[in-house]
Image: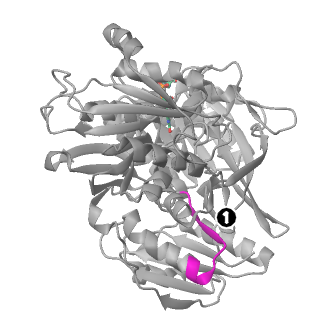
Amino acid sequence: MGPILVIAEVLDSSVRKASLVALGCATRVAQEAGTHFDVLCIGEGASQAAAELGSFGAKRVFVTEIPGGYVCERYLPTVTHLVEQEGHKFVLATATTYGKDLLSRCAAKLKAGLASDVTDVRLSNGSLTFERPMYAGNVFGTLTLNTEVNVATLRQSEFSEAVPQGTTSEQVELPMQAAPLADRVHFLGLEQVASDRPELTDADVVIAGGRALKSSENFKNILEPLADLLGGAIGASRAACDAGYATVDMQVGQTGKVVAPKLYVAVGISGAIQHLAGMKGSKVIVAVNKDKEAPIVQVADYVLAEDLFSAIPALTDALKSAS
Amino acid sequence: MKILVPIKRVADPDNANKVGVSADGRTIETSGMEWKINPFDEYALEAALRLTEHGVTKERIGEVVLCSIAPADVATTLRQGLAMGAERAIVVEQDDSALDAFAVAEILAALVKREKPDLVMLGKQAVDGDASATGQMLAEQLEWPMATIAMRIEVEAEGKRLKVGREVDTGVLSLRVELPAVLTASDRLVHPHSVRNGVTPADFSYPESDGGRYASLKGIMAAKKKPIDTLTLADLEVSPTSLCDYTQFRLPSARGGQAVFVNSVAELVQHLKQDAKVL
Ligand SMILES: Cc1cc2nc3c(=O)[nH]c(=O)nc-3n(C[C@H](O)[C@H](O)[C@H](O)COP(=O)(O)OP(=O)(O)OC[C@H]3O[C@@H](n4cnc5c(N)ncnc54)[C@H](O)[C@@H]3O)c2cc1C
């Protein structure tokens, strides 16, 4: 197999932590295949972000500074140009909303097969085999791609992050390629939700709330003290997001984020199939739910069948006094 | 505005845990499960209908054409979309079970060249394959701009362009796209104020709902008379190529053990500390 290219995701002039798993996978596959991997750091603030990527064992870190926010059509020609120029045979990124947007279109432009949101990448006889969840995680499919170039996005929770290697990658400026569609789509802005807590997909502990929380004030007053005490992130069911109790970036599930923390506490969440798809890989699952028969119980390790409005503050207090 | 809405039928997603795998692991089994419109395609259709109607009078001011690549009996599923208000539908008669996103996009691209819509509205993912790729691949094959995971749409410049809010990991990313374009729908697109078409008064509120509109009795009757055309790949002069080969399927491994029901917060804390060792 030929060389590998990792697309790093740049946000606020820094590399998103999610990208580290793509680097980790590239490191392993490159080693097994006896090849090298490069990284492309592209977007506004890429030059600054690239400094964070120098020690992960990539042969080269290509840097393309593109002012303005992310627009697929502006980035894509540079990505595919690099792949063609360097003969990369495996192009990967983490399956964030960015990764899925950019790499799906990238695969089409390269006429290359795409394996989306994969949970496993294996190399055998020089070619790649992928495994990926389907039907909200109720079936896993093994697939190969019958094109010379393989493109994949990786489910963050299923791969380990790269660790610094103590090497220094060569940094190469890569000019932005002409983007014929750039005058037909324009970036207007990115409204981000500010938070001091860890990102949902990076956290070791997730406290998630459902419809039963009844208001955004309750999300704040009931869940936040517990999350803060445990250094955790706050997640939510779709019902809670739709009702405006939580912001949409907090949704866990088939169509929200997929998390696999050490501890997931589902508070007043029934455990619909679409919700389970986003959290059943968690190491330990605690359900706090008045209903002993709620579907969440089928994946939970511990169930506290009490009213959340008394149970969660009591849990917070118990942990506070124990520490 | 003319909008093409591709519809995929999927095995009932609320029973996705009943999906099986054949003994040899070669095929996914959904027999006995009911076909449903892929929920995200339904959201795309709802948004397309809102874009092409006067929200108050419900007068149609544009055209919504449904299409599906599937065996002929998908017509039943398409009738539901026609009953919601779409004007007509096209079936591209083809077994779709082995088509990947690239192949589906090739067929859709051929259909777009024939139908010449201003906009193609797809779901952001089909909840069977869960890939989130068809919209992006279609946009690339058409060389059109795109906005995926759309949660807000506002029509600008008399329908020549759209302002779209995309639901991304860290918040909402806004784009302005010139038509023709490809959009993929997020579930938030069915919220009461998510679609502004410049004709429906800005303060008009669509009902709170977590899906598309219900078909009225009148809608259901009208749908019976609406045309559903059938095309073949030969009619479209396209021979799609799938680039993925699925070789094996399996069911997920079960999470170990039964849940422990604890009787108090103190007991829970003890378990988490001593048995699970996560605190
Ligand atoms: C296409 C599609 C995609 C979807 N994607 C997602 C997704 O990504 N993520 C997601 O979460 N959902 C998703 N859903 C929605 C999903 O089907 C459920 O509707 C949703 O998860 C329900 O949220 P909930 O558990 O908060 O609410 P409910 O199902 O209403 O559950 C509330 C729970 O709280 C319990 N409860 C009530 N009061 C108390 C109390 N005082 N103390 C303790 N417990 C209490 C109840 O017993 C109940 O179990 C999707 C649906 C569709 C159709």
Which of these two is toward me, B227 or A188?
B227
Residue A252 left/right relative to B87: right
Q: Which residue is mark 1?
A: A160
Q: Is residue A305 visible?
A: no
Which quadrant of the figure contains the N terminus of chain B? top left
Residue A249 left/right relative to A265: left
Which of these two is toward me, A32 or B33?
B33
Where residue B279 appears, x then y in whole percent?
Answer: 63, 50
Q: Is residue A299 visible?
A: yes
- Residue at left 71%, top 45%? B276
Which of these two is toward me, B177 or B193?
B177
Tag 1 subunit: A
Residue B21 occupies which quadrant of the picture? top right
Q: Which residues are magenta?
A: A84-95
Residue B5 occupies which quadrant of the picture? top left
Report how many numbered discs are placed on residues in the image.
Answer: 1
